[in-house]
Amino acid sequence: MGTAPGAFGSALRVLRERARLTQEQLAERAGLSTNAISALERGARRRPYPSTIRALAEALGLSAEERVELERVMRGRAVTRRPEPPSDGTPPHQDAALVPHPEVTVPMVVPRQPPVVVPRQLPAVGRDFVGRTADLAQLDALLSAEPASGPGVPSPVVISAIGGTAGVGKTTLALIWAHRMKDRFPNGQLYVNLRGYDPGPPAAPSDVLEAFLRALNVAPEGIPARLEERAALFRSSVDNRRLLMLLDNAGNAEQVRPLLPGSSTCVVLVTSRARLDGLAVSVGAVHVTLDVLPVADAVTLLRTLVGAARSDAEPHALTALAGSCARLPLALRLAGQRLASRPYLRITDLVDELDVETRRLDVLSAGEDAFTAVRSVFSWSYRSLSTTQARMFRLLGLHPGPDISTHAAAALAGIPLTEARQLVDGLADAHLVEHVGRDRCRLHDLLRAYAREQAQTVDTQTDRLEAVRRLVGFYLHSASVAGHLLHPRREPAMADGAPVPVQLAPVSGYDEALAWCEAERVSLVAVTSAAAEHGMFTAAWQLPNTLWSFYYIRKYWADWATVCQIGLDAARRSEDCGGQARMLSGLASVYRDLHRFDEAILHYQRALDLNRRLGDRFGEARLLSNIGDVYLGLRRYNHALDYSFRALVILREVGDPYFEGVALGNLAEAYLGLHRYDEALESFQRVLELCRKIDHRHGEGRTLIHLGETHLGLLRHDDALDHLHRAVQLCRDIGNSHGEGMAWKIVGQVHQATGRSEKARRCWQTSARILREVGGPEADEVLAQLRRLTG
């Protein structure tokens, strides 16, 4: 009969099972034999060496605190606690000799995996919703009805308004119904404002699909560039999921069609001023057409806002007010709010005032437009604002993005943040803006157009231009700070093309910088365009330049290409060769990431020519290194060697250790591709020293992998495994799943080279799983190796 395991052996067993490792896998990672792991777990060896504990702790990915606890267990000083089962509910093997001791401390170790977030994207909705009973019932019936397009085919629900009327409550109805039904969709709810009728450009279907795929936990590297491929991947990702989608404010059927899922388990709501008859024909969409509110419901909404006592005192005036507001919910809420905020005012007086305002605007307005039904109410609400509130409202209409932060509003108005916050809150109280998050607001598209119209009428061209300049300055300088936080080793981006704001965006660390860029992503593109349109050509190329790190990390290739093209055009208009070079380099980086290597080289070469003309040696070196990197992608290693070596000579001249490491790494990879292993080894070792000197952990992990690959080429298999296991651990520590997957790929190759086919198979299975999870294109190569191995 085997001996009962000691405390250390029991703890090690539970830790290993929580990490989902076999004894053999743990032995590989720790550099120990399988027999040693077995002896420790069985209690045959109760006092391991400190070096063994350190190796085990590293292999299991323990924190510093957990390592100390494991050493305490070994010494018999641990706090008594029963271990819990694995967090995913999978029971461990119940071999009696391997059940953990009932009184042993087990460090809590959970495998490091990226969290799977279920998207819950529906915006909040107000509480003053009334009526629409029949419309809600029609939507309810659609869940149980057979799709018009046939069994098993989803029928999107299109909520439209008669004659394109705005402000009728399409979005509110859709949100009310979606919130009521969201529990039926456990796999999540997706929402997007398609901006079909905004003054700026509508949302591109390709960008929307990218955002949806990211929300569904698809890694950025796994999202293809072409619209058709993104649409196909989206349909695959949502297949058989219970998912609710709300596509708000669509401009036309062409904007919607690529976003539709292919599974009948998904339900789609689409709101639009247009009927979108094309969807009814192609996919059997069902129309729920909204009219203005019935008189009774319009009066009920006003009564809810104004209060029962005042409504009962003037019932006829209340009905007249509903008619003056065209029974549109948007106008009714504005009127009701004004009455609620002025308890001394009679309803009759407001009806008379509104009728006078309507006649005034009818004279000023030529023909029908989107404002006809509500312009009088807008004007009436606007004229009730204080001077400073009215100015803020007008300036918000100049912001080109879909929403605006209080910090951006402060910059736009050139006032302190606290004052801006008070003004925006006042506009929200007047229902002229809507809060959409902490310190963020937006305007209904009709109100935005009205605000812009008032700015054109009231403010001088100089005042409007100065406001835009302040706004561009806020985004440029905030993006510069964020970019440096995202990539502190990259040279600080120039940001002298716009005035420095009184207050920057509140970002002070990596996570905050990334979150700010994400929140402002659409606005950053719009503001770049606005800078170019208003003649701020330097800012128009500096903004994309400051955002390089964000786009590189998040892989928003379409946005990146768009802003770089805007910046390039602006730099050309101002004959700014330095700006042209940086924008050409940015476009080349996009093409390189998309594996459009010929276009990447063309743009890098044009940028290189400009830098040489300017005498910019550092810029020349960076571009030479980048061209060498593209040639690595093309596997033209002699070209990569040539360009990388030329870059390295200049970088040692100008003294930049970070980019020297980049160029030296490219040089080493070229040697590796040419099977010049001794030279590759020497170069990679120098890269490793540089990475550690400047604490570049991502570069260190990548270099450890390349060193493992180099030692494999030199047939130094033990050295290869040593470097690769260290790479696995480091990549886990910094959350670089792609790097970990690549390390396991090379570990498998080492085992295959030494005749350990079963170990190679297990390593490649791990590699393929990780690379598939992060969308790494190398997953297909690993799967091909597995197929060849198994025959």
Image: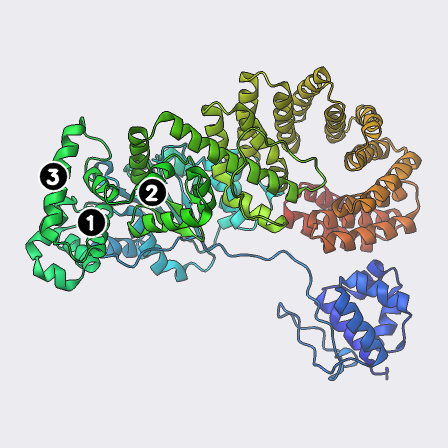
Q: In what element is the residue under mark 2?
A: helix
Q: In which quarter of the image is the N terminus?
A: bottom right
In the image, 119 versus 697, the foreground residue is 697
Which disc, if any, is residue 564?
none
Q: In what element is the residue under mark 3?
A: helix
The percent position of residue 138, horizontal first and vertical second, equals: 25, 53
Q: Mark 3 points at which residue?
A: 356
Residue extending furthest toward the left: 316
Looking at marks 1 and 3 on the same chain, the residue that comes earlier in the sequence is marked by: 1
Q: In what element is the residue under mark 1?
A: helix
Separation of marks 2 and 1 at Cα, in angstroms: 21 Å
Q: Which amino acid does label 3 sit on?
A: Val
> Label 3: how many residues lie within 10 Å, few (<14), some (14-19) or many (20+)?
some
Which disc, if any, is residue 388?
2
> Label 1: how many residues lie within 10 Å, few (<14), some (14-19) or many (20+)?
many
As drawn, is 55 to the left or to the right of 460? right
Q: Which amino acid does label 1 sit on?
A: Ala
Task: Report whether residue 708 is seen.
Answer: yes
Q: Name the residue under label 1.
A: 335
As drawn, is 260 to the left or to the right of 359? right
What residue is rendered at 61% in x and 23% in y?
Answer: 579
